[in-house]
């Protein structure tokens, strides 16, 4: 929601620019927003996301460089206000993208992955140990163990990668789509 608000505010502050620059800047924001909306679409692997991250960074860099020139060309009455609000909003967009990239890099946290491995090892040991003590194979216990572990790993990984897994969290992206439609 913070990212949506920042992009919306940046788009709205383009009104402080000259008419030609205003249209050009709003097109740049629309293009950035289109890329941002499609960031997780057709997710294949982490390498594909890295390429998209580079594209978003380049797009944002272009917005920043053109914004400096546009602020210099802003009408005399709005020049100071444009310099203060316009550029700070673009910087907030950059911070929002930086946070998104950081969240991509730290997921899943190593503690969760180590905990999963430890949980699998402990439950497998206990399952095998009980079968050795009874001196018989308990297929029901093995099946329940496998089912519970698959379910736990499925839920945890889908929570860590909500856009890439089977459990899609479309509400997060829908706010960006609603913003784009309002432009």
Image: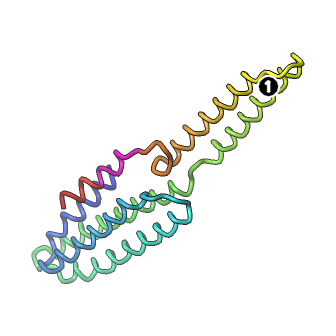
Foreground: 155 or 146?
A: 146
Foreground: 165 or 1?
A: 165
Q: Quadrant of the C terminus?
A: bottom left
Indicate the quadrant where residue 15 lies. Answer: bottom left
- The overriding secondary structure of the stretch rendered in magenta is helix
**Which residue appears at 77% of the width and 31% of the height?**
124
Q: Is residue 33 left or right of residue 183?
A: right
Residue farthest to the top? 134
**Which residue appears at 56% of the width and 51% of the height?**
107
| Magenta segment includes 173 | yes
Span colored in magenta = 169-176
Foreground: 131 or 80?
A: 131
- Location of residue 70 with respect to 34 vertically, above or below: below
Give the total of numbered labels.
1
Residue 91: x percent and y percent? 35, 66
- Location of residue 66 with respect to 167 vertically, above or below: below
Question: Residue at label 1?
Answer: 126
Residue 171: x percent and y percent? 34, 45
**Scheme by which the image is coloured:** rainbow
Residue 92: x percent and y percent? 34, 62
Q: Is residue 41 left or right of residue 175?
A: right
Q: Is residue 102 left or right of residue 138?
A: left
Q: Circle 1: is it few (<14), some (14-19), or many (20+) Cα within 10 Å?
A: few
**Which residue appears at 15% of the width and 71% of the height?**
16
Q: Is residue 48 left or right of residue 171?
A: right
Foreground: 62 or 50?
A: 50
**Which residue appears at 24% of the width and 53% of the height?**
178
Residue 25: x percent and y percent? 23, 74
Classify mark 1: helix, strand or loop. Answer: helix
| Magenta segment includes 136 | no
């Amino acid at each position: 929601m913070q990212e949506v608000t920042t992009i919306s505010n940046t788009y709205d502050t383009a009104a402080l620019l000259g008419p030609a620059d205003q249209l050009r800047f709003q097109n740049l924001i629309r293009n950035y927003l289109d890329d941002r909306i499609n960031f997780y679409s057709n997710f294949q692997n982490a390498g594909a996301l890295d390429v998209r991250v580079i594209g978003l960074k380049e797009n944002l860099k272009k917005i920043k460089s053109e914004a400096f020139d546009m602020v210099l060309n802003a009408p005399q009455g709005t020049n100071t206000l444009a310099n203060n609000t316009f550029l700070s909003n673009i910087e907030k967009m950059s911070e929002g993208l930086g946070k998104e990239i950081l969240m991509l890099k730290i997921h899943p946290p190593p503690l969760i992955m180590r905990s999963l491995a430890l949980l699998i090892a402990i439950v497998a040991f206990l399952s095998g140990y009980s079968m050795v003590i009874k001196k018989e194979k308990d297929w029901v216990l093995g099946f329940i163990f496998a089912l519970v572990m698959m379910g736990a790993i499925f839920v945890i990984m889908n929570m860590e990668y909500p856009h890439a897994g089977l459990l899609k969290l479309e509400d997060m992206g829908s706010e960006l789509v609603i913003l784009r439609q309002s432009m």
